[in-house]
Amino acid sequence: MARFRLRFLLQEFELPQGETLLGRSPECHISIEDPLVSRQHARVTILGDDVAIEDLSSRNGVRVNGQAISGRHPLADGDRLRIGTQELVFSKVTSPPSDASSKRTGFLRHCGRCHTPYPEELGLCPTCGTVAPLDEETMSGIVGETKQSWTLQLLVEVLEKALSVGRDVDAERIMRRASVTVDERLDAGGALDRRQVDALVEAGASLAKLQGKSSWCRWGLSTYERLAWVPRATFVAQAHSLPRAELDLLRPTVTALLRALRERGGTMTDDDLAGLLKLEALGRELGV
């Protein structure tokens, strides 16, 4: 009878016959400390050589090879499972079992600095520790800029979903994590995807409007200043709709962004020109 495993970063979890629970709870067979993972997120069931995964009505769902699943979904060798912001690889094992290289259960520690879960027994985060992991040591081969871009994209998707159903508490938590990801990337001098940044700051503006507070609009304006990018007109319009008292709090960041854009100069696209006109109109209203 074939054996099956799930691989995550440097650790492999051997899957027994029957059911294996995956989730944030330490009581699950495989526990993943990730704020976007539900306490009991998914269940893998093995009956003979038939393997299937099932989403347990989790808040953020399960994806197999990038596609959201519903109900029971069969698994094949090499399938990639996305749970929260994490990706695990399912594999069929043909080699003899080795006690030294596999475990039936495990607990993943959540790195407080870069927010990446990793096997608890490592004692050092493989993402931001002094010794960086090799590509072949990761569960997906996605490291560095590509991995961070993928994580940010997922955070944006989950944030937009939370906002669409009015879950402002969840949206605030996700926005904080996404903003830290962007800030750390900028601090390290790394590149960012323009579409992801635009989507994130617009989601932040939606959250700001929902809360009646300007903080996430100010963060968005500051981020554009650091990048010397013109914000989209839709973002500026959302910021402009804040209550007057909160709108006045945008004056320093609007001033700094307009200064950065003047210093940058250069040609602009039609979208940039539209955004700049909106920003200048906001600046005039604020007395910039």
Image (cartoon, rainbow, N blue to C red):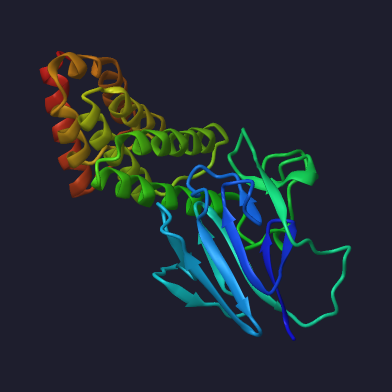
- In the depicted view, which residue is nearer to us: 268 or 178? 178
Compared across the picture, whether 209 is left or right of 31 comes to left
- In the depicted view, which residue is nearer to us: 175 or 31? 31
Which quadrant of the figure has residue 167? top left
Residue 58 position, x and y percent, is 43, 55
Residue 266 seen in the current view:
no
Q: Quadrant of the C terminus?
A: top left
Identify the residue shown where x is 56% and y is 47%: 24
Which quadrant of the figure has residue 262? top left
Classify 157 as above or below 231: below
Residue 80 position, x and y percent, is 56, 68
Residue 228 position, x and y percent, is 36, 34
- In the depicted view, which residue is nearer to us: 74 or 146? 74
Count of marks placed on residues: 0
Classify 58 as above or below 253: below
Identify the residue shown where x is 18% and y is 41%: 234
Classify 245 as above or below 69: above
Identify the residue shown where x is 62% and y is 33%: 112
Q: Quadrant of the N terminus?
A: bottom right
Residue 238 seen in the current view:
yes
Identify the residue shown where x is 34% and y is 50%: 195
Residue 221 position, x and y percent, is 31, 29
Classify 125 as above or below 78: above
Compared across the picture, whether 157 is left or right of 205 comes to right
